[in-house]
Amino acid sequence: MAGQRKGHAYPGRLIAVEGLDGSGKSTQIYLVKRWLELQDLKVFFTEWNSSVVVKNATKRGKKRQLLTPTTFSLIHCTDFADRYEHQVLPLLQAGYIVLADRYVFTAFARDIVRGCDREWVHNLYSFAVEPDITFFFKVPLDTALGRILGGRPSLKYFEAGMDLGLSQDPYESFRLFQKRINDVYLKMVREFGFVAVDAAQASEVQQEQVRAIVTERIDLPGFRWRTRR
Amino acid sequence: MKRFYGRGLPGVASKDLSGKLIVLEGADGSGRSTQAELLTAWLERKGYATVNVGLNRSTLVSRELSRAKGGNVLSQRTLSLFYATDFADQLENRIVPALKAGFVVLADRYIYTLIARDVAREGDRAWLESLYGIAIVPDIVFYLRVSPRQLVERNFQKHATLDYWESGMDLGLSRDMFQSFLKYQGLIQAEFERMQKAYGFDILNGNRSIRAIAKDLQARVEPILERSAA
């Protein structure tokens, strides 16, 4: 089936973190990165929305509010594909542990909330391998919102989900948007076998749980550098 | 009534699309753009508001697309998604509004060129078909078939050189550009013939004179316009 994701046979391993803005997932994946690096393992970190080639078009589209749900979805997928084929895939082939701060599930959640067809979006990203482990940082909606909105940040148009027309107030729009994203995430937990981490716990407690699962599922000593650095 | 090939576009009801969508397909040098101009003039003379669209003309990504093609820096999948973004942008911002207004939309190339190019590069057909499930099924699709040999001549007349991409040089079919061009155009034509069966194109012999092809096109478009009057 087109939307069905599959495991991979590459020597590398892929670990993804997903969760709402303000769930603390970036901190957790950073700590995983440091932990693996300090053991002298082959590790590489990649994050969403960082490809150089596609950046200008994405920026222009966002600034001038040119994007519809479909073009929003496609331009982010283009960006993802560029990074995936130049970076993630070769690293997996070369036997790295690849850490992804957000992966295809972020796109699934955003695009589906924006009204794109679920099957269509799943098919769109079907070229990407399924992660070996996907951690989902589960946080009460109010906690995540509090962390993000506490500083009264200036929310960008698409970031606040203003294009959905949920509310004229960016903060209210952001709240409603994040609630819908969270609902889609929660549905994906079982569908894609996420490892849910209670992100309301202390940071170091979460990290301990994450490290235990990584150690259990990935043969870490196999990822030592073969050559002296 | 209009249909979509697949799941369609969020927020667009196909029943609101009362205009006509006419597609012209064919290789570079097939006379496609000349015929699009002539057909537009003919339609306008008859009083039909006509909107022209083509590939790589979107405000969103056309600049980046041209740059990326120049530098050959994008992977196949990325380039194909870039084209899809360009297509979707024009579909939503030009084609859909024009069809809603009851205009005639004349597309100088459509999803079929994009699919054929990717399939020639071992793209996944099922993936492409789902991707382009956002596209509206045209009222009629014309494919201007010109033999690769004649395409070569016309390309030389027009540009005095063969285009890197239209020669499929990125496929490594041959280091010789002329040989690569012939092979690549052959692959594209084979894919168009396969699609002709699946999608039901009108194949036109593009080796005839400009005037003869224009007359042929007009005769085939006429009944489609009448359908809206009825």
Image (spheres, coloured by chain):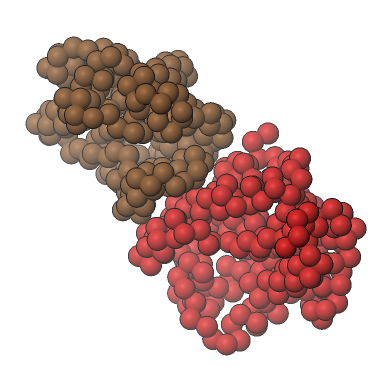
Provide residue B197's location: percent of width, then percent of height.
Answer: 45, 15
Q: Report the residue at 18% width, 39% height from top.
A: B49
**Looking at the picture, does residue B198 appear above or below residue A73?**
above
Is residue B226 among the parts visible in the rendering? no
**Looking at the picture, does residue B3 appear above or below residue A115?**
above
- Looking at the colours in the rendered structure, which chain would you say is drawn in brown? B
Which of the image's four quarters has the N terminus of chain B? top left
Residue B176 versus residue B118: which sits nearer the camera? B176
- Left or right of B202, for residue A194: right
- Left or right of A168, for residue A47: right
| In the image, farthest residue toward the front | A228
Q: Report the residue at 47% width, 37% height from top.
A: B132
Residue B166 versus residue B105: which sits nearer the camera? B166
Q: Report the residue at 32% width, 21% height from top.
A: B178
Which of the image's four quarters has the C terminus of chain B? top left
Which of the 4 image quadrants contains residue A138?
A: bottom right
Residue A23 versus residue B202: which sits nearer the camera? A23
Provide residue A186's location: percent of width, then percent of height.
Answer: 73, 60
Which of the 4 image quadrants contains residue A218?
A: bottom right
Is residue B119 among the parts visible in the rendering? yes
- Looking at the colours in the rendered structure, which chain would you say is drawn in red? A
Residue B171 versus residue B177: which sits nearer the camera? B177
| In the image, farthest residue toward the bottom | A151
- Left or right of B56, for residue B211: left
In this rendering, the count of numbered labels is 0
**Looking at the picture, does residue B133 appear above or below residue B157?**
below
Provide residue B82's location: percent of width, then percent of height.
Answer: 43, 46
Provide residue A119's location: percent of width, then percent of height.
Answer: 61, 42
Q: Report the residue at 79% width, 79% height from top.
A: A203
